[in-house]
Image: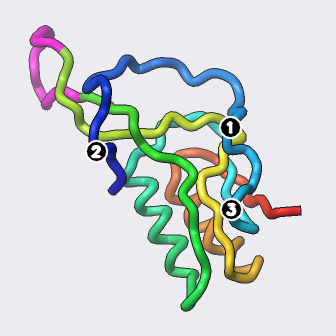
């Protein structure tokens, strides 16, 4: 699973996801990609599940790029913990995704295989996604 080696601040505020993405919206590395169509927090476990789903379609070839990295810490307190006592411990890391962001890029396989691979990967993620290809 992906997680940062070191973070500047151990605990972050929640924040709000507003607007559409203006970075990583075009294919830069591969011929095919998976684009986000919604807003959500994508955890490192979900990214790993999607990555494994894509790799199943690579038969001795193909390359994949992951265009997101979960660096936002999410805290949680234990079950049945009373109010007070401060903010909970860091539980997991997420990437707050906005519409228009590329999540994965792949190359080196046929378009049909790429469509299947990215469709399967999109099913593992908590947002609607779209298959895109280089013009």
* Residue 29 - label: 3
- Residue 107 image point, x, y percent: 68, 73
Q: Where is residue 112 in the image (x, y as percent from the top left)?
A: 75, 79
Q: Considering depth in this image, is 50 or 73 the residue closer to the camera?
A: 73
Look at 47% across and 18% down and name the residue there: 15
Q: Identify the residue at horizontal 61%, vertical 72% (top origin).
A: 117
Residue 77 figure quarter: top left
CA separation, marks 2 and 3? 25 Å
- Give the vertical position of 33 relative to 53 (above or below): above
Magenta stretch, overall SS = loop
Q: In which quarter of the image is residue 83?
A: top left
The quarter of the displayed image where residue 65 is located: bottom right
Residue at the spot of label 1: 23
Q: Where does the magenta region start and end?
A: 76-86
Mark 2 — residue? 5
Within 10 Å of disc 3 (Cα), the crowding (few <14, some 14-19, many 20+) is: some
Q: Residues within 10 Å of mark 1 (few under 14, many from 20)?
A: few
Q: What element carries label 1?
A: loop
């Amino acid at each position: 699973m992906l997680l940062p080696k070191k973070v500047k601040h151990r605990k972050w505020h929640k924040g709000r996801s507003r607007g559409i993405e203006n970075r990583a919206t075009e294919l830069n590395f591969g011929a095919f990609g998976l684009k986000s169509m919604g807003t959500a927090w994508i955890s490192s476990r979900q990214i790993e599940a999607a990555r494994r789903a894509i790799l199943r379609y690579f038969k001795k070839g193909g390359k994949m790029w992951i265009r997101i990295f979960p660096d936002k810490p999410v805290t949680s307190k234990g079950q049945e913990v009373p109010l007070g006592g401060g903010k909970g411990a860091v539980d997991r890391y997420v990437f707050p995704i906005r519409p228009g962001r590329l999540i994965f890029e792949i190359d080196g396989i046929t378009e049909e295989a790429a469509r299947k691979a990215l469709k399967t990967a999109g099913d593992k993620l908590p947002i609607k996604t779209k298959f895109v290809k280089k013009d």
